[in-house]
Amino acid sequence: MNLAIWLVRAAKTSPENPALLRGTDLVADYREFSRRAAAIACSLQNDLGIQPGERISILSSNDTRYLELLYAIWFAGAVAVPINAKLHVREAAWIVENSDSRLLFASRKLSLEIASLLPACVDKCIEIDGDDFAKLRENDGLGEPVARAMNDTAWLFYTSGTTGRPKGVMITNGNIHAMVFSYLADIDEVYSRDAVLYAAPISHGAGLYNFQHVIKAARHVVPESAGFSPAEILGLAPKLNNVHLFAAPTMVRRLVDYAKSSGLNGEGIKTIIYGGGPMYLADIVDAVDVMGPRFCQIYGQGEAPMAITALPRHLVADRKHPRWKERLASTGTGQSCVEVRVADAQGKPLNGGETGEILVRGAAVMKGYWRNDEETANSLRDGWLWTGDLGSFDEDGFLTLKDRSKDVIISGGSNIYPREVEEVLLNHPQVHEVAVVGRPSEKWGEEVVAFIAKKPGEQPEIAELDQLCLDNIARFKRPKEYIILPELPKNNYGKILKTRLREYF
């Protein structure tokens, strides 16, 4: 089933419901939202030659036009490839090439920056905030969304891998159906009077929450800043009322700190979904104390989007259960659309209290990695997704994360894989070895630190190392500190001991 059918239905049943807003200003009602998506889809198909199943990349910060384009892509039967706008343009260009995208839609600034790096597969780059995009809306529109099967890919989500190269997760129509219905069954209700506020990137988790709100013909709000500002959110929420938003734990911390210092309590906010990394127990206790029972937690991955476990608001706010603190420190219980298992290295289920790798099976699990059979076979075994995360169940089925076996650093809700940064720094002629680890940060959750073993007789300049990173990877991945050592600690097999390096802090 084509996801755009949900928009078409909402437009027919609730045509005058406000749909797209910039701040408090109405951009389009559901009739116009659907009309624009259908018109752009017609232009994609008839004027630009896009065929069902072909990929279209989007490189833009949050914008109401982003949602128009997503639904137009699906309307035409194509595959959306949303790219994190914070990535370095070289990284973004690699994703465009790897996905074999026929078209790239980018904001004007990013369009200029990536122009010289566009791969040969791209027929055209269109500025999402330019006149050419506006002209795409002038078509009469496709009459019906192109027929698509449940196992057809709808969203190609790129997530960094341990090798340093991103992997394209093939998220199908069926995966998204399972995620949406589990959200409505296990986490929160959505009504037409509600509003989803896109303070986190639409290219990632926040964008996945659009579907629940389209189905209910609710409002979609992009703040004037197009990003995350605690003052803006807490000022806008009372004007909108019944606001939902997705936020990484560090964003929740900043929001709560601002509310506390300003004497605010989150008026107008109905639900804050937090995820993308573990949240400190003290922080979520403080959040509920300051803003009340507005919080729900999800645990998922790009490979099982937002759909592994959940901790709904009544459990986040519970203070009566004898083990409420342990439950609050967990990621909750399995969502309705999946089975969740903690297993040993052979996949054998472990008993409650034992720590092992978290495995997931069910309708929300990805089809596989785009053109990467080796990684697909490694991650999907006997129908189970091996997440790479370590955790344990308690006797009531609450899952607690223990560690991340792949050493991923989660900073401000974004995943940063050490190998990727290490490979860049190893290009410096005076660097012998590199080990990148995460250091606890009150502001970001974790921050990147690079330990460097210099070559004998050499002394790499910190400014040169920093510039090397800025020239090759996204700014948010660059180390906050470079620590130069004579040598890095190793075990008897010559493997660098990152556990020892973390003790440095």
Image: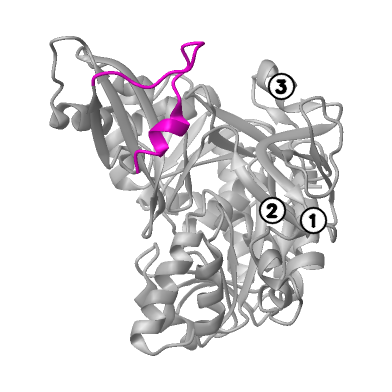
- Position of 151 relative to 186 (above/below): above
Q: Majority secondary structure of the magenta segment?
A: loop
Local packing at callout 1 (Cα closer than 10 Å; few below 14, some 14-19, many 20+) is some
Mark nearer the viewer, 1 or 3 = 1
Marks 2 and 1, the one that precedes in the sequence: 1
Q: Check if residue 141 falls in the magenta segment.
A: no
Q: Residue 331: which quarter of the image?
A: bottom right
Local packing at callout 2 (Cα closer than 10 Å; few below 14, some 14-19, many 20+) is many
Q: Nearer the viewer, residue 110 or 235?
A: 235
Q: Which residues are magenta?
A: 486-505
Q: CA distance from mark 3 to mark 2?
A: 24 Å
- The residue pinned by badge 1 equals 394
Q: Amino acid at mark 2?
A: Thr
Dot 3 falls on a residue whose secondary structure is helix
Q: Is residue 145 visible?
A: no
Task: Using the image, tell me which numbered label, if any, was put on residue 400.
Answer: 2
Q: Nearer the viewer, residue 49 or 62?
A: 62
Q: Nearer the viewer, residue 332 or 458?
A: 458
Q: CA distance from mark 1 to mark 3?
A: 28 Å
Task: Using the image, tell me which numbered label, if any, was put on residue 378.
Answer: 3
Q: Residue 216: which quarter of the image?
A: bottom right
Q: Position of residue 414 (x, y in %)?
A: 47, 47
Q: Amino acid at mark 1?
A: Asp
